[in-house]
Amino acid sequence: HQPLLDPRLAAACEGPIRGGVCRDEDGGAADGLGLMRCLRSPAVRARLPADCRDAVTRRMLEEARNLTLDVQLHRACSAELAAPPCSLVAAGGGARRACLQR
């Protein structure tokens, strides 16, 4: 199964993911948003191989720049993004994220 939407991150972190570095509430392998939340946690990131840790960091930086990559934030703020003033802001360069922060 494909646990992540980011194929580079999935490839770099395949070993730790298959090894069960992240578990869900039932003890099964975490996937999707739960997996990303786990991989971002400082305690888990410290244990990841360098290539996986770098891929997670790259993804976090991309999410900081591109609101649509941060699925949780995009879902939580969809009403605000659909209404003025944020709906009038062009996507790109962090402008929509900045609009949400105002």
Image (spheres, grey):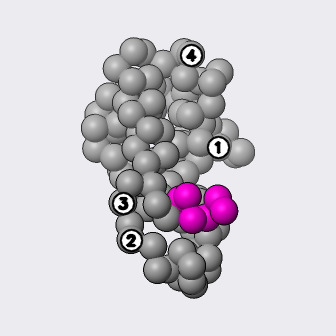
User: Can residue 80 be seen in this snapshot?
Assistant: yes
Quadrant in which the C terminus is drawn = bottom right
Q: Counting other residues with Cα less than 10 Å from the Cα at mark 3, is it few (<14), some (14-19), or many (20 or more)?
A: few
Q: Counting other residues with Cα less than 10 Å from the Cα at mark 1, is it few (<14), some (14-19), or many (20 or more)?
A: few
Question: For the residues carrying marks 2 and 4, which lies nearer the camera in this image?
Answer: 2
Tell me which amino acid carries mark 4.
Answer: Ala
Q: Is residue 58 left or right of residue 67?
A: left
Cα separation between marks 2 and 4: 37 Å
Query: Residue at left 57%, top 65%?
Result: 99
Disc on res. 92 = 3
Which range is magenta?
97-102
In magenta segment, residue 100: yes
Tell me which amino acid carries mark 3.
Answer: Gly
Q: Nearer the viewer, residue 16 or 63?
A: 63
Cα separation between marks 3 and 2: 7 Å
Cα separation between marks 3 and 4: 31 Å
Residue wearing tag 1: 24
Q: Earlier in the sequence, mark 1 or mark 2?
A: 1
